[in-house]
Image (cartoon, rainbow, N blue to C red):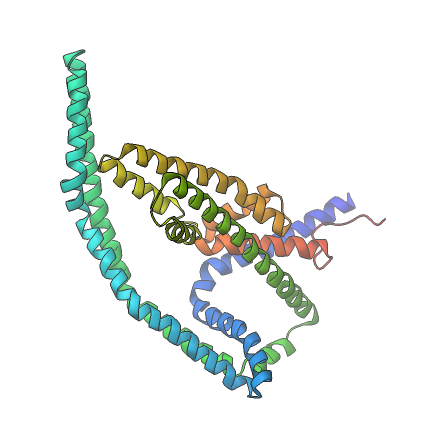
Amino acid sequence: MEKKRAFLINIGYYGFFIILLFLAGKYVLPVIMPFVVAFVIAFVIHGPAGWLSGKLKVPKKYVSLLILILLYVLVFGGLSLGGGKTFAMIRDFVIRIPQRYQTDIAPFLNYVLEEIGDTLSETDPFVAGQIEESLQQFVQSIGQTISTFSVNLLSDVSGILTGIPSLLIRVVITVVTSFYICADYDKIVGTVWKHLPEKARTTCMDVKKYGINILKIYIKSYTLLFLMTFTELLIGFLILRIPYPVAIALAIAVFDILPVLGTGGILIPWAVVLAVIGNYSMAAEIMLLYIVITIVRNFAEPRIVGKQIGLHPLITLIAMFTGVSLFGLPGLILFPMAVVILVNMEKNGALHIFDREEK
């Protein structure tokens, strides 16, 4: 009974803090996100700046600021060069979706309906008429859906544009804060560290140690998944005799790193376009390639990630799904990492969620 009571107390204790962390991540983190991002940038720069400072015999403060300036020049330079063109291309594409449907897809669907109607007219005319009418209504509903989708997408884009001033304010705060933190990183961290209780220091050191290790493992795991997807795509394109197979496979594999989009974001529209222009065999082959890659990815990802980070594939899959459901794309990576850090800290005695019997 004492062990059960201690177990329940530990679960309640850590569960309370997990709930607090969840609420903080849901409601507090968006408010302080510019400062968090600024500190993360300074933390990442801190290591290389220290190494370069020792090599160049220059104070680390100035090296950090120089690296930070170069980083922002690259990021904002790339955005200014490609961001406007990308946005214009997306806007033009969205505007032309209904027109594309009327000029390309609708005639093809009407042709299919006529073929189906001619085939069915040889059987029961009444049934043929009912089926043809239903199919025509289906085609009309598709057109209305596409038009509605285009309008909604344009309104979403407009909503993004109206949110740009707020985003710019956050970006400016992040940039300015990152310069202040980089300039006095050691002093800021030292002051915070000095005022932390001993237990909190130990916990922070454990989280940092396990977090860095898990981040390295994640990079290794998703590199393996990237190479696996690239290899599957390359083999498939070589079999299908797709031109420029290496470049296309590489581009889609990079696109596949984004979990929300994946290979389906390219292969499915590709297959649809091939079907519209009448190349049914190639469309079916592209769809088959997509199905194979999806099955292999869903089977391999929990196993590869779980094996690398020391979790059972089922736990990894649950953590991924929970993370993406609660926090979106960042949660897909951060939530499993948090679970792994807790599990490894428990295994090594840094946490005591579960009582162990003395041997």
Q: Position of residue 317 (x, y in %)?
A: 54, 44
Q: Position of residue 64 (x, y in %)?
A: 51, 81
Q: Position of residue 271 (x, y in %)?
A: 31, 39
Query: Is 79 left or right of 66, judged from the image as shown?
Result: left
Say if residue 111 shows up in the picture.
yes
Query: Is 358 left or right of 54, judged from the image as shown?
Result: right
Relative height, residue 344 to residue 198 (above, below)? above
Q: Position of residue 250 (x, y in %)?
A: 41, 53
Residue sitting at x 18%, y 41%: 101
How many tags in the picture? 0
Residue sitting at x 57%, y 60%: 215
Say if residue 195 shows up in the picture.
no
* Most distant residue in the right direction: 359
User: 194 or 67, which is in the foreground?
Assistant: 67
Q: Quadrant of the N terminus?
A: top right
Residue sitting at x 67%, y 55%: 344
User: 215 or 81, which is in the foreground?
Assistant: 81
Relative height, residue 299 to residue 88 (above, below)? above
Q: Give the quadrant of residue 238.
A: top left
User: 136 or 216, which is in the foreground?
Assistant: 216
